[in-house]
Amino acid sequence: MDIASYIEIRPEIMMGKPVIKGTRVTVEMILESLGSGESVDNILDSYPRITRDAISAALLFAAEALKTERIYPIAV
């Protein structure tokens, strides 16, 4: 899947947060919705301009972002 076909980052849209192309639906919102137990079908019903493939692209985008992030544990 070509993530760039579904996700865009533009400073003038949602302050530069990654969004589903042609919408103001952020990758962050999709992740939060899925993480809180909302179904893909419910998200699609709520946002008819996005597709199942767009939701998959949002998940892949987040996974790719985490691959390049370094996390350093802090001793407590």
Image (cartoon, grey):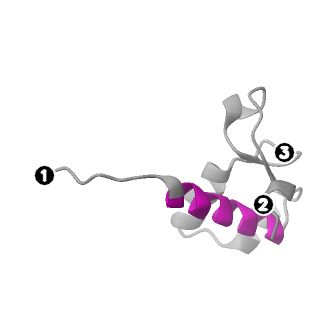
Secondary-structure class at tag 2: helix
Q: CA distance from mark 3 to mark 1?
A: 41 Å
Looking at marks 3 and 1 on the same chain, the residue that comes earlier in the sequence is marked by 3
Q: Is residue 60 left or right of residue 3?
A: left
Based on the picture, tell me whether residue 63 belongs to the magenta stretch: yes
Q: How many marks?
A: 3
Secondary-structure class at tag 1: loop
Q: Which residue is mark 2?
A: 3
Q: Magenta region: which residues? A: 52-67
Q: Mark 1 packing: few (<14 Cα in 10 Å), some, or many (20+)?
A: few
User: What numbered label is drawn on residue 38?
Assistant: none
Q: Which residue is mark 1?
A: 75
Q: Position of residue 75 (x, y in %)?
A: 13, 52
Question: From the viewer's perspective, is the residue at label 3 or at label 1 nearer?
Answer: 1
User: What numbered label is drawn on residue 23?
Assistant: 3
Secondary-structure class at tag 3: loop
Farthest left residue? 76
The type of residue carrying mark 2 is Ile
The foreground one among 35 and 11 is 11
The type of residue carrying mark 3 is Thr
The foreground one among 33 and 12 is 12
Q: CA distance from mark 2 to mark 1?
A: 36 Å
Q: Position of residue 29 (x, y in %)?
A: 63, 51
Q: Is residue 46 left or right of residue 72?
A: right
